[in-house]
Image: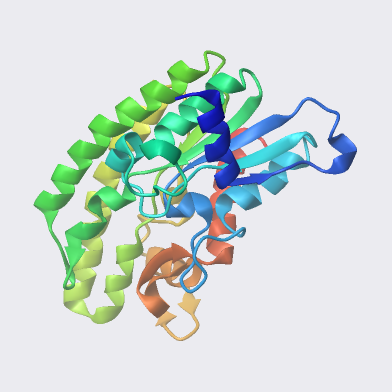
């Protein structure tokens, strides 16, 4: 893919420039890659400028006024479509993919990409939950696909810039903990969902570390393993801490939508920021 094609792709994505006062400085870039979380998707609004990458960018900008945010993510992206394209055809010209555009951007700006974040894999297994149950075999197959594809994605990104920017990938929280609200059967489903998510997060974390990435442990931030602590949540009463976090910081309990609220995205941003010293 030519640099011209890559430039067109970035132009069609969201690029937030630094302030005019720093226009003469050598620009640096924070590249945000991934699925709908990376572009701040919210129900009823679509992609927004209130996602975790936007929040993280503000923290990083305070230390580097020359920094520009390049959002290349795609709502609904799987690990397969990130490699092969086909999901966000309007964002990646000439049938290219998010990975190809990201690799070209890294090659075209050697040493200028100072930060890179990635969240990918949730959509590989999202279809495994239906009708108040989770298909464990579907999750296992999806996890295998994630492991294979994430290795290829990270190989491509690290090869594209020998001076690897400060990079981090995230673990996922567990929106299906909301099943807890439906009664005993739902509580069994919630417990099972955590076990399955741990397997996915473990596979992803191992890949990230093996490729020199830091791991932003969003699962820990959302207290995914804590079924014990009993905070009180408006409209829901006393809940286990992990369920309470899903109800407070995502739209899952109120709208059956897995995406974070504004406050939830800020929590994710804070988790990444801690890894970047921001």
Answer with the quarter of the image where residue 174 lies.
bottom left
Q: Is residue 151 left or right of residue 236?
A: left
Residue, x 70% and y 29% (percent of image)? 28
Residue, x 57% and y 56% (percent of image)? 51
Answer with the quarter of the image where residue 121 lies.
top left
Residue lying farthest to the top in this orientation: 162
Q: Is residue 35 above or below residue 205?
A: below
Q: Is residue 119 left or right of residue 139?
A: right
Question: Is 158 or 223 nearer to us in this picture?
Answer: 158
Q: Residue 208 in the image: x percent, y percent? A: 40, 29
Answer with the quarter of the image where residue 277 lies.
top right
Quarter of the rendering occupied by the N terminus: top left
Question: Is 187 or 100 nearer to us in this picture?
Answer: 100
Q: Is residue 10 above or below residue 133?
A: above
Quarter of the rendering occupied by the C terminus: top right
Q: Is residue 219 above or below residue 186?
A: above
Residue, x 52% and y 70% (percent of image)? 45
Residue lying farthest to the bottom in this orientation: 235
Q: Is residue 205 above or below residue 74?
A: above
Residue lying farthest to the right in this orientation: 21
Residue, x 28% and y 35% (percent of image)? 203
């Amino acid at each position: 893919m030519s640099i011209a094609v890559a430039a067109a792709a970035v132009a069609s994505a969201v690029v937030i420039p630094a302030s005019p006062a720093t226009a003469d400085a050598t620009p640096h870039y924070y590249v945000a890659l991934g699925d709908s979380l990376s572009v701040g998707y919210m129900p009823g609004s679509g992609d927004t400028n209130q996602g975790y990458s936007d929040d993280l960018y503000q923290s990083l900008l305070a230390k580097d006024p020359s920094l520009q945010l390049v959002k290349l993510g795609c709502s609904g992206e799987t690990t397969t479509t990130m490699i092969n394209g086909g999901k966000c055809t309007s964002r990646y010209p000439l049938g290219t993919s998010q990975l190809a555009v990201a690799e070209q951007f890294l090659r075209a700006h050697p040493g200028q990409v100072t930060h890179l974040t990635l969240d990918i894999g949730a959509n590989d297994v999202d279809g495994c939950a239906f009708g108040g149950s989770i298909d464990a075999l579907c999750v296992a197959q999806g996890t295998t696909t994630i492991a294979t594809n994430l290795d290829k994605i990270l190989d491509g990104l690290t090869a594209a810039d020998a001076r690897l920017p400060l990079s981090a990938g995230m673990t996922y929280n567990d929106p299906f903990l909301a099943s807890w609200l439906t009664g005993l059967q739902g509580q069994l489903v919630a417990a099972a969902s955590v076990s399955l998510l741990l397997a996915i997060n473990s596979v992803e974390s191992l890949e990230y570390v093996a490729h020199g990435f830091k791991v932003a442990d969003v699962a820990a931030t959302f207290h995914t393993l804590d079924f014990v602590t009993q905070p009180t949540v408006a409209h829901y009463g006393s809940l286990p801490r992990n369920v309470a976090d899903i109800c407070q910081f995502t739209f899952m309990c109120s709208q059956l939508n897995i995406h974070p609220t504004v406050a939830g995205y800020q929590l994710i941003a804070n988790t990444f920021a801690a890894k970047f010293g921001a």
